[in-house]
């Protein structure tokens, strides 16, 4: 099983869009996937048509100790289960502040889940912050994917993300590493996007070999700006179901192929890498 955290402390960079469409694309390829929504806004679940009302259990019930992940997960589409979230989850930050072992609540829940159902991938969509929920995700997983908009300020914020992963790796999870960076909202043909890509490549190449991001792959796939990606959530569908012939589908399909190729240590060639 591969456990992957999709995180960025900056909002509006394609984090939830990447979490959902990566999960959906892997499911389309026959992989068994569980998508855990850790953002109190609950957008990952809503994106796939899973809405939490007052009677529907959510991931908050897992953190509160009332439910297991197996009891909360819902089948969204074939091969893809969703553990939804709602605004109640925001209370977790305060409720766990003095709790013992507060950083490993999710890890224990995931270990119990694996005893009931075997998944090929567990993907966690984190909130745009570096609080208790994100630390729980980092402690429970082995990989971190960072969706990044190729803008100057987004690149500046990357150092904070790297510092957080290094801290969690040192104190809570020795297996944690940043394995992928995906460029989202990519504007083809612009000098800025190309410059940021070059700067990021040089930074990764010059990184300390002991850092958890040294082996990070800058995915060849570029997730281009596409209105269909923005429309899909309002229909409760992934881009693969909403607009299967759109450039958004092409781009995320390329990303999925790269992620799957990494299982065998092979290199995937993206059809839009030159975009």
Image: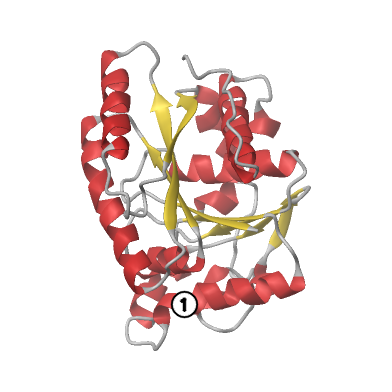
Relative depth, front residue between 101 and 98: 101
Residue depicted at x 53% and y 18%: 272
Seen from the viewer's position, the closer of residues 181 and 125 is 181
Residue 23, placed above or below residue 55: above
- Can the viewer see residue 237 in this picture? no
Q: Does residue 128 appear left or right of residue 239 in this picture?
A: left
Work out which residue is located at the far front of the displayed protein and give it.
209
The structure residue drawn at horizontal position 27% and vertical position 14%, both measured from the top left corner, is 191
**Which quarter of the image is occupied by the N terminus?**
bottom right
Left or right relative to 4: residue 83: right
State which quadrant residue 265 falls in.
Answer: top right
Residue 90 in the image, given as x and y percentages of width and height: 40, 68
Q: Secondary structure at mark 1?
A: helix
Q: Which residue is mark 1?
A: 104
Q: Is residue 16 above or below residue 107?
A: above
Residue 122: quadrant of the picture: bottom right
Residue visible at 57% across and 39% down? 233
- The residue lying toward the viewer, choosing from 110 and 232, is 110
Whole-percent x, y for residue 253 in the image: 63, 30
Residue 79 drawn above or below residue 86: above
Residue 231: x percent and y percent?
Answer: 55, 31
Taking the spot 42% from the left edge, 31% from the top edge, the residue there is 184
Q: Depth check: 185 or 183 in front?
A: 183
């Amino acid at each position: 099983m591969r456990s992957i955290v999709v995180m960025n402390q900056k909002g509006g960079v394609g984090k939830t869009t990447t979490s959902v469409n990566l999960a959906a694309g892997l499911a389309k390829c026959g992989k068994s996937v569980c998508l855990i929504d850790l953002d109190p806004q609950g957008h990952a679940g809503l994106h796939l048509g899973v809405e939490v009302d007052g009677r529907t259990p959510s991931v908050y019930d897992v953190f509160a100790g009332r439910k297991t992940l197996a009891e909360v997960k819902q089948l969204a589409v074939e091969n893809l289960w969703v553990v939804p979230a709602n605004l109640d989850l925001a209370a977790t930050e305060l409720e766990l502040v003095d709790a013992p072992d507060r950083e490993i609540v999710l890890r224990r829940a995931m270990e119990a889940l694996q005893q009931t159902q075997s998944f090929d991938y567990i993907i966690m969509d984190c909130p745009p912050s570096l609080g208790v929920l994100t630390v729980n995700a980092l402690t429970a997983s082995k990989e971190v994917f960072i969706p990044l908009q190729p803008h100057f300020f987004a690149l500046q914020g990357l150092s904070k993300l790297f510092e957080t992963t290094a801290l969690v790796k040192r104190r809570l999870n020795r297996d944690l590493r940043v394995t992928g960076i995906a460029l989202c909202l990519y504007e083809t043909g612009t000098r800025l996007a190309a410059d940021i890509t070059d700067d990021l490549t040089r930074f990764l190449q010059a990184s300390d070999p002991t850092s958890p991001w040294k082996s990070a792959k800058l995915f060849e796939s570029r997730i281009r700006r596409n209105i269909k990606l923005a429309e899909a959530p309002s229909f409760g569908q992934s881009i693969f179901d909403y607009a299967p012939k759109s450039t958004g589908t092409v781009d995320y399909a390329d990303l999925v192929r790269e992620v799957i190729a990494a299982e065998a240590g092979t290199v995937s060639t993206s059809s839009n890498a030159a975009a």
